[in-house]
Image: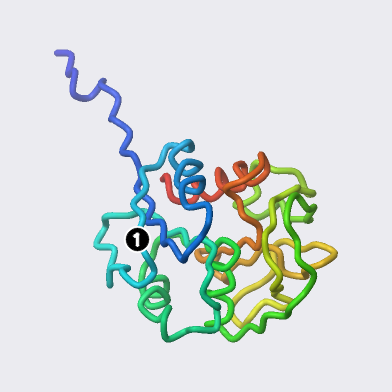
Amino acid sequence: MAHNPARSAAQPRVQPRVLVVDNGTLSLKQLRSRLEQLGSRTDAVRASDVPSRLDGRHQAIVLSGTKVRAYDTDFYRPLLDLVHSSDVPVLGICGGMQIIAVAAGAELTPGPQRVGGHEAQVDTGEPLFTYVKPTVTVFHRHTLYLREAPPGFRAIGRSAQAPVEFLSSDDGRVLGAQAHLEFRRDGLEILRGFARLYEG
């Protein structure tokens, strides 16, 4: 039987692309660097300039933290439409999570300012937490808290200060993290769990 090199050659790995939506974060460079460290290519776009459709160009969407209030749903309407009309995994970070939650009907509550590493307990049965232990130390920089998951979502992580540190839609496609996962080792490993969702 003749040897067919085309069959035996390993298929080249297609590098996934992530659309990173910049909502005014102070750490866009670090966020993109982390995702690229995990093997993804990233394209950054401002929230006001998001495309109306992904058209297969990106395998995931990440919403950065924000300087603009999450309650400004008119400003974020094109972004929210993209999140809900796409079929790829979505991860909202800090303000990015709050934008998604508020649009779904959640309320944000002012609380003590948290800056630096803080512990949270996570549901390790969730794919997002494949690579971490039940207690993680993640970086926070915020004063607003999500006290309850909105309809269609559930809390998958919590802390003494915030009943909803991590959020998941009921179908598991849209996820959120109050913490800035672009910092600290546990943040990287949670991003690794997210990457696992779109690499296939």
Q: Amino acid at mark 1?
A: Val
Q: Quadrant of residue 14?
A: top left
The residue sitting at 46% across, 47% down in the picture is 29
Residue 6 placement, left or right of 18: left
Which residue is rendered at x = 55% and y = 78% of the image?
69
Q: Is residue 146 above or below residue 160?
A: below
For residue 78, what is the image quadrant? bottom left
> Dividing the image into 4 quarters, which one contains the C terminus?
top left
Quick check: 178 left or right of 118? left
Residue 130, how many percent across, how many down? 64, 45
* Residue at position x 52%, y 66% in the image: 174
Task: Locate residue 149 relative to residue 90 in the image: left or right.
Answer: right
What residue is shown with label 1? Answer: 45
Q: Position of residue 150 (x, y in %)?
A: 63, 81
Q: Is residue 67 above or below residue 69?
A: above
Q: Nearer the viewer, residue 110 or 156?
A: 110
Picture coordinates of residue 111, whole percent (x, y): 78, 74
Q: Position of residue 49 (x, y in %)?
A: 31, 69
How many marks overall? 1
Q: Is residue 163 left or right of residue 78?
A: right
Element type at mark 1: strand
User: Residue sitting at 49 percent across and 46 percent down?
Assistant: 195
Q: Nearer the viewer, residue 27 or 79?
A: 27
